[in-house]
Structures are given as C-alpha cells and as structure tokens.
Image (spheres, grey):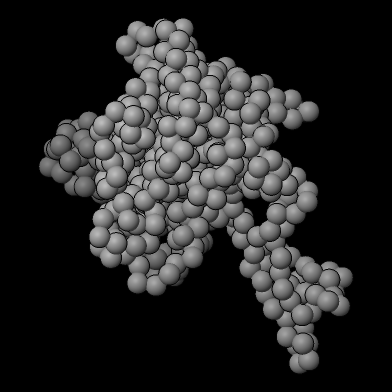
C-alpha cells in the first residue's frame, strides 16, 4: 500500500499485464476487500464465461484496513470493550469522570496495548521463519502505544509546568531504548577488556545524558581508567555537575520559582566551567558538558547517534528550559524538524506526534484515522478526550460529531465478524443521541443463527426500547420455525411478537395435525403460555383442551367430561377437530360410572349427526383412513346410544 499525494485516500497498486490495454473491474467482497480483474467487457462479471485461450484473466483479492483482523486483535477488542463500558458507566453515575479516573482508564487502555504487543513479540521471536505480517502487526501496536502514551501525558494528565518534560524524558526512555542498547553492547563485549574500551562507550554516555539519566552517566564515567576524584580533575568536575543537577519534584511541594532559581544557578555553573576550559583536555567530556549546557549545536551533531526530531527536541528543552509549559512546546518543533529534513521528510508517525506537540487534538485524531489503518485508537482516544472537553463538536464542515462518527466507523469494521456482535451493541448503546437509531440498524443485520442468540438480541432490544426490532426478530424466528415444521416453537415466537393472526393459523395447523395423526407433541407448550392463550379463539381452545388432558390424567373424569362437552357445545373447535374431540369421549362413555346424563348425551349425538352431514372433512383422507374413521364413528354412535339408555334408566 502506498500513500498518494491526496490527503483523503490510500492507493493500492495492482500488477496485471492485461491492465495495459483493458479496464479494471471490481466486485465487492465481505469486509474491507475487493475482487479485481481486467476485462474488455463494458459490464464485466466474474460469473460470465470468457474466452481465455489467448490471455488468462487473473483475479486479484485486495484488502485494506486489515491490521486489526488477527487473533491478537480479538483480545484487544474484547478487553478494551470492558474499559470503554466502564468509562460510559462512570459518566452516567457522576456526569463526567474525574481527571484521576480518566487517567486510570487511559492507563488501562495502554496496558492492553502493551499486553498485545508482548504477545506478538513472543510469537515473532518463537517463529522459526520470518513472518512479515507479524512484524507489521508489532509495528502497529508499538506505534499505537507510543502515540497513546504521548497523548496521555499532554492531553489527559495535563501536568503542571515544570513536570511535563520530566514525563517526556521518561517517555523517550521507555519507548526508545537506544541508550540501553549501547550500554548492553559495552558490557557484553569481552573482546575489548573493559566497557570503557568499547567503541560505543561514549555514545552510551551521550545518549544516557540526552535521556536525563544522570546517575547512570556517573556510573559509566566511573568505569573510565582516567576517572579520578581529585579536585579540579575534569572527571570530578563533570561528576559534580551531574550529581548536583536539580530535578523538579512536584509531589514534594517544591514551587516552580524555587526550582527555576536552583536550575539557573546550576546551568550558569555548567556554562562557566565549559568556557573556563575545565574540559578542554578531554574532548569527550567537553561534548558531555555541552549537552548539560543545552547547546543546540551539539544536539545537531548527535542526531545520527540518537534518533528522531522529537527525541532531540525533548532532550534540548530538558537542558535548556525544563519548566516549559505544554502550550509552548510547539514553538520549538520547527527548528528540529528542519534539522531532520523539513516537513517533506515527515512520515505518518511524525505527523501524528507533531499534531500532539501542537496540542491540536482534531489533527491528532484525523492523522490517526488516515495513517494507522484501524479505528481502534482514534475511537477510544477521542472518547476519553471528549470527557476532557478537548474534542470539538465537529471535525468536518458538515458538523459531524467526532466521537459518534468514530464509534460508528469502529463498530462498522467489527460488524463483519459474527462473534463481535455483542461488542458492537455495547459501543452503539453509548453512541450519543442517535444510539437507538444506529443500534436498530445494526440489530437488523445480526445473523440469528440460534434461538439462544435471538433471545439475547431481543433482551437487548427490549432494554433499549426497540420494539419494532423485537417484532422483526420474532417474525424471522417464527418463519424459520415454520420452515422446519416446528409449530410449537413458531407459536412461542408468535406469542412474543403478539401476532394473534399468525398464532391462530399455527394453532389451527396444530389442531389439524393432531386430527390427522392423533399426535400432539407440542401440547405441553400451552402450560407456559399463561394469559397469552386469550389472544385468539384457537389458542383459547388449545388451552382448554390441555386442561382436559390434565383432568383426565388426574382421573377427574366427571370434570374432564364436562370440559370436553363444553368445547363441543361452544363450537369453538374447528370442524376438522370434531372427530378427535368426539373420540376423546369414548373412554368416558365406556366407564362404569355415568359421566353424561340424557341431555348431555343427546347433545353429543347431535354433534355426531352434524359431523355425518359434513362429509367433506373426510375428502382429504385416503380410502383406508376413511374406512377406519367410519368404523370409529359407528363405534362412537353405539357407545352414545348405550350411554343414553343407561342415563334414561338411571
């Protein structure tokens, strides 16, 4: 991927010999990917047959913004989600997190980044072959942690004047261990006899000094064979200056004025000894003294030894103006950028850090979006800075809310992964005034692969008041259940969606199935419907029919018989189900104890006569089924006649 001249687009170069004479066509794939190919057709399609006898057509799969699509990225996404939700919950409790709370959240984000980087480095070091993709991921995570830590110092921690440079020096120490590398080389080289004889001995001392590590510089100087403690010795003189260098300590209640007075006295002593010729006999010590004096010339001379413009900037200010405020840092950036080739030589990381030194939050976010290839950092950084009142309401001329825009973009990059849907829901739930709008649109895209997942999504929608989405999910699950002939499950989804019309259709279908097969595998479902059975007459009938089975099982035959008679007399049951209801009367009629009296038996006979007149209900049966049904009806009529006789005698 190459960066073009435009500030708003990235260029991906595709090499294909056919593209010299033919147009390039592309088809969208899932996620951030395209399938590109060269073709002479005006409207090309990968599905159309082509003559490839002369020139075969190559398919090029193009990806972009894929840096976060890795196993380690899943850890980053899932763990940072907990921190993000914690920030929002704290904001809901107290209105806005305090500075100390925001700093704690920021450090939590950084610890996650560091953990991911360490995991990547372990994989990289343990790999037998060089893995270019893994190295790119390491560079990305290292860059993100570097940017975040600087923004934490400048924007979130916002330390008082006099301490920011101490923090920036520590920032350089931890992220650019060049001094440690030089020291390690000196101590590990046995060929030179002692560390002081190593070629990197003095570079180690210079870089330690540039990072403000004066105590370590003193320890290294003591290794030199010419080191002496006599008065007026150049080593003793430089050692004294290093030992007496004042360090501002805000936590010890030291005032800025008090520190400036001590530092100015110390700095004047450094300049006095340098121009007094204390170090003229030792050129290396003279170079070290120039560093302590804050000599800009020596800073330029050591650029190849030390590193980048921002490292040199921090080292120079540390020895030149240690109490500088954050707002004054950017005044010195141009001089050091010019030393390293000017604005034209700045890379993506340089531009992001330069915007941070200028305290331009909008530009930091904009550059991160443009160059990092992931929405993770700008999204979470903007969220924290939003609560620091540093993120403006808009970053574009259209007035788009920055925080909201970044959250939507970040969740959009995650929505291609089915396993990330709970993460997307959490972020969109705290997106701002349009949270429910975005959440509703996303919920419609969640693949409902199981009833358990659908139930989770419904609970979320109910919690957020997304009633239309609840109905939509229930309809989807209802239709899936119907397609698999799971009538009981389909009915439960209808009840949840309060779809009385479709519930009636399913109930009728269940009754017809029972009438045809004599099996009612879903009748137990009625026990859990409660008052929902009243939403349609068919469901009400199912509920009553279930009660009949319970009474019969409990051997309450009289009550069961009366309930069955009421179901027939009320005409609530579909006519197709009458044969089943009448056959349910048969075991009751054959009992020794009289269940039905004369009037009730007469009513049952009347129902049987009506059924005989409606022969069309048997038209869908096979000849054998029809014969069996007629035998059952004759047997039932005989039982009713006998019961009528018994009732008259009684």
Residue 338 lies, in percent from the top left, at 69, 40
Horizontally, residue 641 falls left or right of residue 494, namely left
Residue 37 lies, in percent from the top left, at 73, 72
Q: Nearer the viewer, residue 356 or 413?
A: 356
Horizontally, residue 46 falls left or right of residue 72, namely right
Horizontally, residue 14 falls left or right of residue 587, namely right
Q: Nearer the viewer, residue 228 or 19?
A: 228
Viewer can see residue 150:
no
For image coordinates 34% across by 57% down, the residue present is 198
Viewer can see residue 209:
yes
222 above or below 267? below
Residue 105 lies, in percent from the top left, at 40, 27
Q: Nearer the viewer, residue 163 or 612?
A: 163
> The C terminus is located in which quarter?
top left
Residue farthest to the bottom? 53
For image coordinates 70% across by 28% down, the residue present is 395
Q: Nearer the viewer, residue 315 or 616?
A: 315
> The N terminus is located in which quarter?
bottom right
For image coordinates 71% across by 42% down, the residue present is 343
Horizontally, residue 600 falls left or right of residue 26, namely left
For image coordinates 38% across by 20% down, the residue present is 246
Query: How many discs mark residues in the rendered view?
Result: 0
Residue 51 lies, in percent from the top left, at 78, 87
To which quarter of the image does residue 43 belong?
Answer: bottom right
């Amino acid at each position: 991927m190459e960066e073009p001249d435009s500030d708003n687009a990235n260029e991906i170069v595709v090499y294909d010999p056919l593209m010299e004479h033919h147009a390039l066509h592309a088809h969208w794939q899932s996620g951030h990917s395209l399938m590109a190919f060269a073709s002479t057709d005006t409207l090309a399609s990968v599905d159309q047959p082509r003559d490839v006898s002369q020139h075969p057509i190559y398919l090029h799969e193009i990806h972009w913004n894929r840096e976060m699509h890795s196993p380690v990225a899943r850890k980053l996404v899932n763990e940072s989600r907990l921190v993000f939700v914690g920030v929002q919950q704290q904001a809901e409790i107290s209105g806005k997190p305090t500075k100390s709370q925001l700093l704690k959240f920021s450090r939590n984000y950084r610890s996650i980044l560091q953990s991911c980087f360490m995991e990547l480095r372990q994989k990289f070091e343990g790999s037998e072959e060089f893995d270019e993709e893994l190295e790119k991921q390491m560079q990305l995570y290292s860059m993100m942690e570097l940017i975040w830590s600087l923004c934490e110092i400048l924007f979130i921690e916002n330390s008082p004047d006099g301490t920011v440079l101490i923090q920036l020096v520590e920032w350089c120490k931890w992220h650019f261990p060049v001094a440690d590398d030089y020291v390690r080389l000196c101590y590990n080289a046995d060929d030179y006899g002692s560390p002081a004889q190593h070629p990197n001995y003095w570079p180690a001392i210079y870089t330690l000094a540039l990072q403000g590590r004066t105590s370590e510089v003193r320890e290294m100087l003591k290794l030199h064979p010419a080191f002496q403690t006599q008065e007026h010795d150049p080593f003793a003189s430089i050692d004294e200056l290093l030992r007496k260098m004042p360090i501002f300590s805000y936590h010890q209640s030291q005032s800025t004025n008090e520190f400036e007075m001590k530092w100015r006295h110390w700095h004047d002593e450094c300049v006095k000894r340098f121009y007094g010729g204390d170090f003229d006999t030792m050129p290396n010590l003279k170079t070290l003294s120039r560093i302590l004096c804050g000599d800009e010339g020596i800073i330029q001379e050591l650029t190849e030894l030390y590193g980048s413009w921002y490292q040199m900037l921090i080292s120079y200010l540390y020895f030149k103006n240690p109490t500088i405020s954050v707002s004054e840092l950017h005044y010195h950036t141009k001089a050091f950028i010019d030393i390293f080739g000017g604005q034209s030589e700045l890379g993506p990381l340089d531009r992001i850090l330069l915007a941070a030194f200028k305290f331009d939050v909008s530009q930091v976010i904009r550059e991160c979006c443009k160059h990092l290839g992931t929405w993770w950092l700008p999204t979470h950084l903007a969220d924290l800075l939003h609560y620091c009142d540093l993120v403006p309401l808009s970053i574009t001329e259209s007035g788009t809310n920055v925080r909201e825009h970044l959250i939507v973009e970040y969740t959009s990059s995650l929505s291609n992964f089915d396993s990330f849907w709970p993460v997307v829901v959490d972020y969109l739930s705290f997106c701002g005034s349009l949270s429910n709008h975005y959440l509703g649109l996303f919920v419609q895209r969640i693949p409902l692969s199981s009833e358990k997942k659908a139930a989770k999504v419904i609970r979320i929608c109910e919690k957020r008041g997304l009633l239309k989405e609840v109905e939509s999910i229930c309809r989807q699950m209802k239709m899936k259940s119907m397609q698999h002939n799971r009538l009981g499950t389909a009915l439960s989804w209808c009840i949840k969606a309060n779809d009385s019309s479709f519930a009636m259709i399913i109930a009728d279908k269940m009754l017809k199935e029972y009438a045809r097969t004599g099996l009612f595998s879903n009748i137990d479902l009625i026990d859990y419907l409660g008052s929902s059975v009243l939403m349609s007459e068919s469901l009400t009938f199912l509920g009553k029919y279930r009660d009949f089975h319970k009474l019969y099982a409990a051997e309450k035959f009289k009550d069961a018989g009366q309930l069955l008679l009421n179901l027939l007399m009320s005409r609530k049951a579909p006519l197709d189900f009458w044969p089943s209801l009448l056959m349910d009367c048969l075991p009751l009629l054959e009992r020794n104890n009289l269940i039905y009296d004369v009037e009730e038996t007469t009513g049952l006979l009347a129902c049987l006569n009506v059924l005989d007149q409606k022969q069309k209900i048997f038209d869908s049966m096979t000849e054998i089924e029809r014969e069996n049904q007629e035998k059952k009806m004759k047997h039932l009529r005989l039982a009713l006649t006998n019961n009528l006789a018994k009732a008259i005698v009684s």
